[in-house]
Image (cartoon, grey):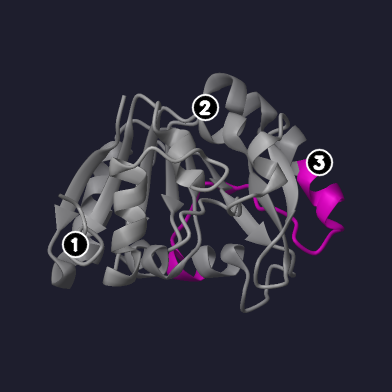
Amino acid sequence: MSFAVEVFPTETYPRAAAERIEGALVEAATLVVTGGTTAARIYPQLTLPGSVRDVFFSDERCVPPDHDESNFRMVTEAMPALTADVHRMRGELDPSTAASAYHDQVAPFVTGGFDVMLLGMGADCHIGAMFPGSPALDEARFAAAVDRPDGMKGVTLTPPAMLAADTILLLVTGQGKADAVARVVQGAEPPESCPARLLVDHTDATFLLDEGAAGSLG
């Protein structure tokens, strides 16, 4: 298998990506959301269908839910009409405790498969909070505590949880990530050095790019 790629004009990207996500969510009951600046531009444009009953997170920084760096805060402020049950990662807890609690919380849903998972990707090809060389890339449990390169602690979903999603949409924008996109889509690196490559054999993983992020694709 390989990644699908869809490219939208940079100036209309947030709304175009939101519409694409809305299409994927038709009849979906479970959704995993991500943090990041690209997602923060999309979410205010996004209307979740009433079928979405449960919302989960791909990762979170170990901060309280009202902290400026909290993905939970960003998502709930960007989508104030959110009516689904929001299952947040409890960043205010000890990281290992928070990871263990989230593993238990998502386990029944991983078994059934998340319907749609949204992921961002960094210029280093990280997804969730699994950065190059992260021990979480080899974690068998569904959530893991991590040390982030910015010095913060975090919690992330792990490969077994991510690969359980029926549909994965990677939201990536900007010329600064163009080389990373090409490494993932056209390269052959292992996930240890290019974490997003762990999704290469997924049956329905699609990059939603703006023109800048698609700039290095042949």
Q: Quadrant of residue 51?
A: top left
Q: Could you say where residue 145 lies in the image, as x and y percent from the top left?
A: 76, 50
Task: Tell me the tag on residue 164.
Answer: 2
Along the viewing direction, whichever of 95 and 16 lies nearer the viewer: 95
Q: Which amino acid does label 2 sit on?
A: Ala
Q: How crowded is mark 3: few (under 14 residues within 10 Å), some or many (20 or more)?
A: some
The residue labelled by disc 3 is: 100
Cα–Cα span, label 1 and label 3: 40 Å
The residue labelled by disc 1 is: 215
Q: Could you say where residue 25 lies in the image, as x and y percent from the top left?
A: 33, 38
Relative horizontal placement of residue 132, taking residue 208 as reference (left or right): right
Q: Which amino acid does label 1 sit on?
A: Gly
Along the viewing direction, whichever of 49 and 37 lies nearer the viewer: 37
**Which mark sits nearer the N-terminus, 2 or 3?**
3
**Which mark sits nearer the N-terminus, 1 or 2?**
2
The secondary structure type at the circle numbered 1 is loop
Cα–Cα span, label 1 and label 2: 30 Å
Residue 169 falls within the magenta-colored stretch: no
**Which mark sits nearer the N-terminus, 1 or 3?**
3
